[in-house]
């Protein structure tokens, strides 16, 4: 940022003489830079600016690993419940070779990221020595209530179509 100061008179000139010369200069003696041109209209841009993710597509689910084998869903719930925007948790208990892991769903990505930064690396169980690893999930978790009929294995439409078929063997239909 440029600062503008009143020019000081040269040491060998009297202040009143210098200010007289300064005031006698006409604005045409100065050259001023040209103002910048306005940006081109939006439709003339050749590159596209990526749009911010819509609320439906932003990641709002956290993946939580580093849990002890005996962890309970209520423990995960209590861990996240005080964070603004917290919605629910979903625990996947250990099975076979996989360890327990969980998901925590938030109302928006900002809330999820705030919780992630606050809890990532926290020692969850001193006895087990388990340290939490928390990151944004690859996709958002959906509760069973949010799934549409088409996403379920036995949709109502499929059931109606099957019940409309005549009973009996396939040869009797032909």
Image: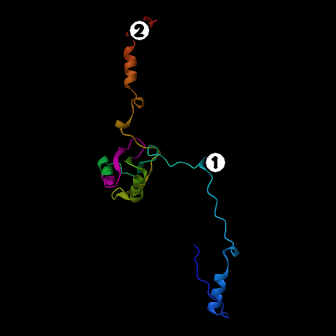
x and y, in percent, of residue 152 in the image = 39, 30
- Above or below, 129 against 169 in this view is below
Marked residue nearer the N-terminal end (1 or 2):
1
x and y, in percent, of residue 169 in the image = 41, 8
* Closer to the eye: label 1 or 2: 1
- Above or below, 25 against 34 in this view is below
Which corner quadrant of the image does residue 23 belong to?
bottom right
Q: How is colour applied across the structure in the image? A: rainbow
- Does residue 121 appear in this view? no
Q: Nearer the viewer, residue 6 or 122?
A: 6
Q: Is residue 152 magenta?
A: no
The quadrant the N terminus occupies is bottom right
Residues shaded magenta: 78-99
Number of the label disc, if any, that sits on residue 169: 2
Q: Nearer the viewer, residue 72 or 151?
A: 151
Q: Nearer the viewer, residue 15 or 142?
A: 15
x and y, in percent, of residue 172 in the image = 42, 5
- Above or below, 117 against 77 in this view is below
According to the picture, the residue beneath numbered tag 1 turns out to be 44
- Residue 129 as seen in the image, left or right of residue 21: left
Residue at left offset 61%, top offset 50%:
41
């Amino acid at each position: 940022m440029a600062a503008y100061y009143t020019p000081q008179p040269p040491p060998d000139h009297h202040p009143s003489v210098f200010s007289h010369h300064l005031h006698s200069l006409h604005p045409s003696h100065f050259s001023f830079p040209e103002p910048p041109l306005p940006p081109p209209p939006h439709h003339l841009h050749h590159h596209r600016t990526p749009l911010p993710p819509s609320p439906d597509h932003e990641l709002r689910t956290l993946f939580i690993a580093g849990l002890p084998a005996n962890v309970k869903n209520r423990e995960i719930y209590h861990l996240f419940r005080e964070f603004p925007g917290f919605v629910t948790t979903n625990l996947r208990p250990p099975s076979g070779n996989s360890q327990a892991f969980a998901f925590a769903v938030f109302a928006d990505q900002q809330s999820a990221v705030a919780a992630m930064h606050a809890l990532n690396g926290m020692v969850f169980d001193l006895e087990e020595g388990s340290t939490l690893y928390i990151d944004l999930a690859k996709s958002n978790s959906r509760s069973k209530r949010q799934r549409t009929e088409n996403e379920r294995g036995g949709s109502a439409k499929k059931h109606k179509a099957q019940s409309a078929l005549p009973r009996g063997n396939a040869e009797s239909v032909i």
